[in-house]
Image (cartoon, coloured by chain):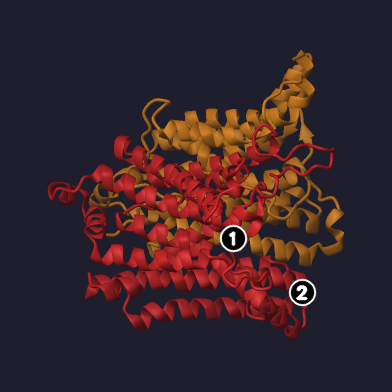
Chain colours: A orange, B red
Amino acid sequence: MTAALLAVFIGSSIRLAMPLLLAAIGELISERAGVLNMSIEGMMLAGAFGGAVGAWATGSPSLGLLVGLLAALPVALIQAFLTVVLRANQIVTGLGLNILVLGATTLAYREIFGARSRETIPGFPAWTPPLLGDIPVFGEAVFRQVWLVYAAIVVVILAAFVLRQTAIGIALTAAGDDPRTLERAGLSVEALRFGAILMTGMLAALAGTFLSIGDIHTFTEGMTNGAGYLAIAAVIFGNWTVGRTVVACFVFGAATALQFQLPAIGLDVPNALLIMMPYLLAFLAVAGLVGRQTAPRALATPFRR
Amino acid sequence: MSASSTLLGTGRAPLGLLVPVLAVLTAALAGIALIAMLGVPFRDALESFVDGTIGSPYAISVSLNRSVVYALIGLGFILANRAGLTNVGGEGQIAVGGIAATALALQHGVGALPFGLAFLVPLLGATLAGTAWGALAGVLKARIGTNEVISTLLLSFIAVWLVYWCVQSTALLRQPMTSAATLPESLPVPEATQIPLLTGDAAAPVTAGLLAAIVLAVVVALVLTRSRFGFQLHAVGLNPTAATRAGFSYATTVVTALAIAGAFGGLAGGLMLLGEQYSLRAGFSSGYGYDGLVVGLLSRGSVLGVIAASLLFGFLRSAGISMEMGASIPTALIQVMQGLIILTVAGAAYWLDRRDAGH
């Protein structure tokens, strides 16, 4: 592999890892609080759709981003209401919401865009940070990215800090590990979980808008195409910690980038193996082959006072 | 727990029946409103809805074949769920079942086997493949406590991509490449390995899978209510510690329960392949496993509930396809309706559970 090829590979790995990372950090927040949030796929799709429609209607990608966040809000609210207040099965509500959002966005997309579906949607331009861009060969190829990439890094650092260092982060983890004790300590498990799901919704929506107006500047039906489930696999492979989840997202991003680069490099690795690899790695991790796994103890268990 | 309460679910008739009926009515109203919004004449929509579901022996047969797949996944789900386990792996169990069925059916000589063995052998292989896929999650749960929700979900993704791999590689199951236009799918399975049609008439292609599903539904109902094993599942589901003290092995129960759920999924995959699709294609499981999981959950643990929900989902899926072709209504409309039904019933479990706990 030449240096130039390597630079392109690293650049596209980062670009592909970032939406995954935003979604995975969102999912991590829910799961740490004890909610296995399968609806992240639907939240991302709603965000992608809202972002595209908003940017197209207003001509401004920034307003599109806002509409994308708003579009994911009802999905998050329904997920939170059903699982926290009504204690419904988290997996079922997740699958139900995903199919509902897939159907609703597809219908709405055809109604709104119809024959105009080939029209480009205004999106965020790529941007190169000063100094970093001057690095020979790698500068432009690696660092020329949409600003959302840099925003995502900030979000991840913030999330790591909040989860590890603040009272609310510790309470959140307790809500997923030992909700009964948390309740006895006078804190509301319901409020923490409800808030965590809303937070997941916002981060997932950010990831979704990244896909539609950050990366390719268009919307296609069902465009998330399992990215949400990939984020769940990243959290699992990441052993429910921020650091390892970040690593997982970059590994998964690199695996995806490699699929497009294989012909250029001339390596004969089955495409299917690369697509499957994230799930395989996550499975090996939960099978205990990559160190000890410690899922939140109350994960996917509704809390009954 | 009495036999009748397992058949009808823990919910007693009025509310237990009212909730799904209301959910379906709500979804139907939403569907009608959306059809009006899309500007499709209501008559056209209704006509293609009826055409695709009950309009012809063919439509009924195809819908029933779909319902069989949902029912098998749902039955496996409620059986494992009785032991407190949530099998999210139906999709992957279908996928490995389809791979095994195809591989065996295309094996030299299998198509020439007598006495129906030509299709029974691949079907058995499919069931065993699903069993192994399910048992794997059970072993992990029993040995190192891996949450089966997570392991079965991941195993599903792995299996779905295994299918893709199988049909991409000529070293595996892809048909010989004769030209650049050769599709990435397996050779069609020999006619002798196809599941016999109950009617013997291709105009009403309901397969013998329907009989298998009916028999298995009765067996599951009996096992859950009348057998020692059913009691064992229930005991482990209620309180693993107490069940272990009573002499039931937790590990054996968990592995067996998930293996059986996997077997049902594998069988469903074999039936889909040998009874409808006839050659392996990427993504052939197309969400049946996840819908089947929802069928199992909506049934609230009752065999009759599984039958009702699988019929509903089977006929709805047919309706969606027919409305797309006949009246240009996107199948997305059916997805919206299905999503609404799932969310309504899942949310209503709150009142059903509370009432069950209250008596």
Whether marks 2 and 1 lie on the same chain: no
Task: Work out whether residue A281 or residue A27 is closer to the camera in this orientation and state it.
Answer: A281
The answer to whether residue A138 is left or right of residue B101 is right
What chain does badge 1 belong to? A
Q: Is residue B225 visible?
A: yes
Q: Amino acid at mark 2?
A: Gly
Counting from the top left corner in percent of width and height, residue A65 is at 69, 50
Chain at tag 2: B
Amino acid of disc 1: Ile
Say which quadrant the C terminus of chain A sits in.
Answer: bottom left
Residue B153 position in % (x across, y down): 48, 46
Residue that mark 2 sits on: B326
Residue tagged 1: A99
- The one nearer the camera, B240 or A54, is B240
Around disc 1, counting alpha carbons within 10 Å, would you say few (fewer than 14), some (14 to 19), or many (20 or more)? many
Q: Residue at x 81, y 53 (%)?
A: A59
x, y percent for residue B327: 77, 75
Q: Nearer the viewer, residue A38 or B204?
A: B204
Label 2: few (<14), some (14–19) or many (≥20) C-alpha neighbours in 10 Å: some
Q: Residue furthest front?
A: B114
Secondary structure category for the residue under label 1: helix
Q: Position of residue A164 (x, y in %)?
A: 40, 33
Whether residue B9 is visible here, answered yes or no, is no
Q: Is residue A250 left or right of residue B212?
A: right
